[in-house]
Image: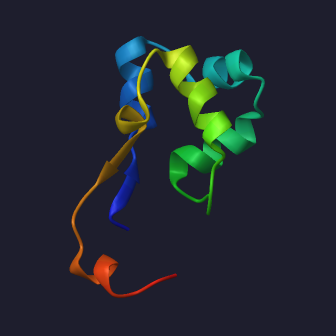
Amino acid sequence: MPVQVTLDAVLAKRGMTGKQLAEAMGLSETQLSLFRSGKVRGIRFATIAKMCAVLECTPGDLLGYEYDPGDLGAEE
């Protein structure tokens, strides 16, 4: 998948665990784990905003993208 979740790198940089982030956001560890692993099909902007507020980062810090020509033609 060309879109990667880079949350683990942000957590490491902040010296924070996933459990601490989940608690600070009021989110279950299971939901956060699904996002971290890239297994979610969607995430609310409000959730990303809260994550960014807690981590003092931007959405671009949480996600990465590698170009894939297939992204231009195929829709999921």
29 to the left or right of 74: right
65 to 54, vertically: above or below: below
Q: In this figure, which colouring scheme has been used for the structure?
A: rainbow
- Indicate the position of residue 46 as horizontal and vertical percent values: 66, 35
Comparing 33 with 67, the one in front is: 67
10 to 74, vertically: above or below: above
20 to 5, vertically: above or below: above
- Indicate the position of residue 50 as horizontal and vertical percent values: 63, 25
Comparing 52 with 21, the one in front is: 52
- Kindly indicate the quadrant of the structure image that contains residue 14: top left
Residue in the image at 38% along x and 40% along y: 6
- Indicate the position of residue 34 as horizontal and vertical percent values: 63, 50
Comparing 15 with 63, the one in front is: 63
- Kindly indicate the quadrant of the structure image that contains residue 62: top left
Comparing 44 with 1, the one in front is: 44
Residue in the image at 53% along x and 51% along y: 37
Residue in the image at 62% along x and 21% along y: 21
33 to the left or right of 7: right
- Kindly indicate the quadrant of the structure image that contains residue 39: bottom right
The quadrant of the picture occupied by the N terminus is bottom left
What is the count of numbered marks?
A: 0
- Indicate the position of residue 68 as horizontal and vertical percent values: 24, 73
44 to the left or right of 61: right
Residue in the image at 43% along x and 12% along y: 15
